[in-house]
Image (tube, grey):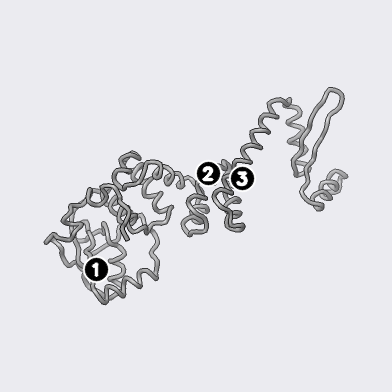
Amino acid sequence: MTKRGLGKGLHALISDAVINNNDNSIQEVRLTDIDPNERQPRKSFDDESLQQLCQSIKQHGVVQPIILHPEGNRYTIVAGERRWRAAKMAGLKTIPAIIRKFHNREIIEIALIENLQREDLNPIEEAEALKTLMTEYNLTQEQISERIGRSRSYIANSIRLTTLSPRIKEYIANGDISSGHGRALLAFEDEKLREEMAKEIIKNNLTVRDVERIASQLKGKTAKKQSRNKQKSPHIIELENNLERVLGTKVKITPGRKKGKIEIEYYSQEDLDRILEVMAGNP
């Protein structure tokens, strides 16, 4: 299967010789002298996948060297953490590696691109990594687009996911809801409502289009309410709000020249009985 192109990608950050493993500088480095990259975008590693890679390494060895950045007497992984972890599981003492100095930004870029090429990152890990490149290293969306081969709209939509609450991010990271669901939830301004909708997505298997439709309907109702409120006096609006707090349901007061109307919503027979008890003074 041909992998999707990622712009200039790793070739823009690492020489072709390094990428193609034709460099004579490949060295065997002790696994105990290597540290994982704390800024690695990928935070979770699938145990089953690691076990499969471990078995492959036991049989064939480490085919592709990892890339390391020297830190004093130790080395930080720039690319190849899965191979390093699997080599440790396989009981190896050393691993083939290419050692080269990188800037901190390059380390994050390379780790991000490597994971994107294998599609190893969940949407939240990817979004957080892209945001880091923007906020900490002052890269524009256009510059990031050139480096990782994704469109600017893709990058913008991905970074938007970082504004969601930790709970919703966890749902997306675990695959309970999709990144498309996450972006649709951003249409709900209230964070509590977003989380309630996320639960509804999981419970009722709602599609992204379902969520977008609900958000659109809610915006329409809000707009109508705001339009009505503009035509009502502050006194009437205050009365409505007071009645809603007392009755625990939606109340609409429509004043008229000679007579007016009060509408009280209920949603079940039990809800109606409850409202009647409150009105009778027996809450």
In the picture of the structure, the residue carrying the numbered disc 3 is 214
Q: Residue at x 25, y 52 (%)?
A: 10
Q: Is residue 175 left or right of residue 259?
A: left
Q: Which comes sooner in the sequence, label 1 or label 2?
A: 1
| Tag 1 and tag 2, C-beta contact below 8 Å | no
Residue 191: x percent and y percent? 56, 45
Residue that mark 2 sits on: 186
Front: mark 3 or 1: 3
Report which quarter residue 219 is drawn in.
Answer: top right
Tag 1: residue type? Leu
Mark 3 in CB contact with mark 1 (< 8 angstroms):
no
> Closer to the camera, 14 or 75?
14
Q: What whole-number distance in Å separates the C-alpha atoms at marks 2 and 3?
A: 12 Å
- The residue type indicated by label 2 comes to Leu
How packed mark 2 is, by other alpha carbons closer than 10 Å (few <14, some 14-19, many 20 or more), is: some
> Amino acid type of disc 3?
Ile
Vertical comparison of 253 with 249: above or below = above
Label 3: how many Cα within 10 Å (few below 14, some 14–19, many 20+): some
* SS class, disc 3: helix
Instruction: Give residue 173's position: percent from left, percent from top.
Output: 46, 57
- Write the residue at 25% across / 47% down: 8
Helix, strand or loop for disc 2: loop
Q: Residue at x 59, y 49 (%)?
A: 210
The residue where tag 1 is placed is 31
